Image (spheres, rainbow, N blue to C red):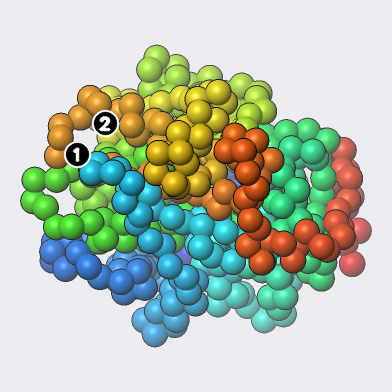
Amino acid sequence: MRLLSTSGEISPAPLSEALRRGLAPDGGLYMPEHMEPLPADFFTRLPGRGLVETATEVAQHLLGDADIGERELADIVAETLSFEIPLVRQSDRISVLELFHGPTLAFKDVGARFLARLLEHTRTGDQLLTVLVATSGDTGGAVAQAFHGVPGTRVAVLYPKGKVTPVQERQFTTLGGNIRAYAVAGTFDDCQRLVKGAFADSTLNDRMTLSSANSISIGRLLPQMFYYFHAVAQLEPDADRTVLFCTPSGNFGNLTAGLMAKHLGLESRFIAATNVNDVVPEYLDSGIYQPRPSRRTLSNAMDVGDPSNMARIRHLYGDDLDGLRRDVTGFRVNDQTTQATIRRIHADLGYLCDPHTAVGIHALEHVLTTQPATTQGIVLSTAHPAKFREVVEPVIGRDVPLPRRLAARLEEPVQSIDLANDPDELKRQLLDWD
């Protein structure tokens, strides 16, 4: 596998280089140079297959020529996906793909664990890798725990101070060791700008080897394709059925992975479901892409006003807006509707969902009213509701039990460093890290 930059100003790079750099030298994001569709018999064999089996075949199709042996790649996939990703039926036309059964109870576990193992595999000699990650909540925990204790790596997690839940914060601020957390005076977009600025800083790049674990890293994005195929594998075979995925979206890595899966041959359409940070639905409506400062909502992991992965989506479609519109419908959901959906789904079905999943469910319900009766909708459920107790409990009127792994983290003291929204301050911190 060789990878291009979305900015188009560098030669194709091997996977190992793209993983190490995170961000391409020209400031673009890495994308596969070619995306050869999976063989037709893959899809005839797909129904009923297991997660690891499906993911291994997709991984070998994508990365089989990337200097990773077949057995080694199979082991990486099996270690990454050591938990279930069940498809839970809600109604005749709606199912929920529960992506929150991993170590940090969020969908980010898939990408973070896969990336950590790829980087460990491709690291050379005694090279020390400094991984930078900006988080609006769940990414920080998933990356921190995936890399905690991994030899030759250290991780700097930047998060917007006071804008993540206490459970989310504990998952990346209580580990210590090779993990450092920085509480930034600003928004997620500010954290993301600081990370991108560090990659562009020549002094930092001369002094240390930097890499990314945000969805700007192609190593985070590639494995997220696996569970789109796994979702379809869990549906009953039906030649007349069409599949409509609803992906709650913030930085748009998850949706990008779905669209890449489509380019590999997955027959599906998509809903890009956002909260009021709706620059992408607005772009799909108007044709004008206008990033703006993010607004704080109950679905905080989606509070992104300038989503990085739009560069990948536009590259994937060659800036063909009409082509993108044929595959993707945008939909925005406000906080009041999010709360009402959590309450209604719990009361009617006995199912408890987090605010991001509620955004997805409401968007899917609405869009399905315009679709043929043969359309089967799948919502990607991105986080366990216990991670958002402050939102969910007042809505349903009862406590949400904390899984043991979350409760244990709440008992640990926070270890974070306050950081001004200043590139020079981040640079100083990184250079002074012993």
Relative to 152, 54 lies left or right: left
- Across and down, in percent, residue 210 comes to 70, 59
Relative to 191, 231 lies left or right: left
Amino acid, disc 2: Leu
Q: Determine the image quadrant of residue 121.
A: bottom right
Badge 2 element: helix
- Across and down, in percent, residue 360 comes to 43, 37
Amino acid, disc 1: Thr
Nearer to the camera, 227 or 66: 227
Q: Is residue 45 visible?
A: yes
Which residue is the site of mark 1?
A: 375
Relative to 89, 83 lies left or right: right
Nearer to the camera, 72 or 139: 139
Query: Quick check: 77 above or below 97?
Result: below
Q: CA distance from mark 1 to mark 2?
A: 8 Å
Badge 1 element: strand
Which residue is the site of mark 2?
A: 368
Residue located at (51% from left, 57% from top): 100
The N terminus sits in image quarter:
bottom left
Disc 1 packing (10 Å; few <14; some 14–19; many ≥20):
some
Residue located at (35% from left, 54% from top): 88
First of labels 1, 2 by sequence position: 2
